[in-house]
Every structure is written in C-alpha cells, then in structure tokens.
Amino acid sequence: MFPDSLNNLIESFKCLPGVGEKTAERFAFSVLDLDDIQIELFKNSLDDVRNNIHPCSICNTLTEDDICSICSNVDRDSTVLCVVEDVKSVFLFEKIGLFKGKYHVLNGLISPLDGINPEDIGIDKLLDRLQNGSFTEVIFAFKPSIEGETTSLYIKKILDGLNVRVTKLANGLPIGAEMEYIDSLTLEMALNDRKEIS
Ligand SMILES: [Zn+2]
C-alpha cells in the first residue's frame, strides 16, 4: 500500500524491539518531515555506530577505541572486578555511579536449554584476566535467574585455585527481572550488601 522506499523504512523500524506496525509507520512518516541536516545526521549516526563501535579488547564493553574509558582510567579500583552478562549492565551500573572498580562483560549466561554452554560465553578471557591482573574480588552481577546462578557457580568453581574473593549481588532482586528494569536503589542495595558465594 505504501511506496516501496517508505515500506522499506517501515520494515527497518520494525526490526527494533517494541516497535510494531503502527509505531513503525508513525516513525517512517516522521522521517519524511525531517530536514536535510537531520536526515544527514541520522544516516551518519547509523554508519558511525556500525563502523566505529566494537568491544573493548580487555573487558568487552562497547567503545570506539581499542581500550574503553573504564579500563584505561587509572583512578578506578583495579582490585574489584564486576562480571556482567551484557554490555547494557555496564551502562546500568555506570548510571548509578556507585561502583568504582572494573568490569568484565560475558557473552551472555550459561543456558543449556538454549544451547548456550560454558565455552560460548567467553570465560577463558575472564580467567586470563584474573590470572594476570591485580583483582582481589570478583562480583557476579547477573540477573536473578537459574541461568545467573548456574553461571556464578560454574565460574566460581573454576576460580577456586585463585586467591580472589568471589561474591554476588545480595538477594532481594526480583527473580526473572531483566537487569535494565531493576530500579537503581534496589541495585545499589544489592551491590552494597553483596555476599560471598560458598
Ligand atoms: Zn574495557
């Protein structure tokens, strides 16, 4: 019903999470109202994120450089490492601004039912970092879930020989909630009250 180019734009917007047919159409029609400068900026931003953003070579968070601003910041505590399941969690913790250590981003959580096994989530790189770093504490900051528990216990076992304290966020986070939907006060309390994994 729409001209092809408009239809393509609508389909593109529908790739985004939470965007259905109606919203995609509304977005596409709004694009028609943008002026040349806005369109140029939009096009360039898409190109830029595609071409310039990649994982930090140390912690895997997203950066435009080889090493991200957190890893290269000498003022941050390099004795505490917060291990998270995805990049979004790093931004979440940074928004709260409470955590002053370093991060390590895994490639998701172990979930055999979904075909995600320990070797798929990048534990080797984490282990390498812990063996060669100055970390004395590792905090597992995963969403409260079976996958989070499984991953914590699995890595904890591997770290047994290393001289590091292994902790996880305190209970009290809503089970099954995605990290990004947990409010910052709850997350702050869970981080402050973190407990050793036995
Ligand atoms: Zn980094």
Image: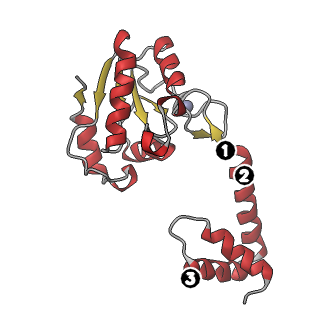
Residue linked to disc 2: 48
Ligand 1: give its quadrant. top right
User: Which numbered disc, 1 or 2, marks the residue that appears first in the sequence?
Assistant: 2
Q: Position of residue 126 (x, y in %)?
A: 49, 24
Q: Which quadrant does the C terminus fall into?
A: top left
Residue at 37%, 52% (x, y): give it.
178
Q: Secondary structure at mark 2?
A: helix
Contact check, label 1 and label 2, Cβ < 8 Å:
yes
Residue linked to disc 1: 53
Foreground disc of the pair 3, 2: 3
Q: Using the image, determine if residue 14 lies above or below residue 191.
A: below
Residue at 41%, 24% (x, y): give it.
77
Q: Amino acid at mark 3?
A: Lys
Q: Which quadrant does the N terminus fall into?
A: bottom right
The reply, left or right, for residue 9 in relation to residue 149 is right
Label 1 environment density (alpha carbons within 10 Å; few <14, some 14–19, many ≥20) = some
Q: Position of residue 155 (x, y in %)?
A: 39, 25
Q: Quadrant of residue 171?
A: top left
Marks 1 and 3, how far apart at CA: 30 Å
Residue 163 shows in this picture? no
Residue at 33%, 28% (x, y): give it.
153
Marks 3 and 2, how far apart at CA: 28 Å
Q: Quadrant of residue 94?
A: top left
Marks 1 and 2, how far apart at CA: 7 Å
Residue linked to disc 3: 22
Residue at 54%, 72% (x, y): give it.
19
Q: Is mark 3 within 8 Å of ligand 1?
A: no
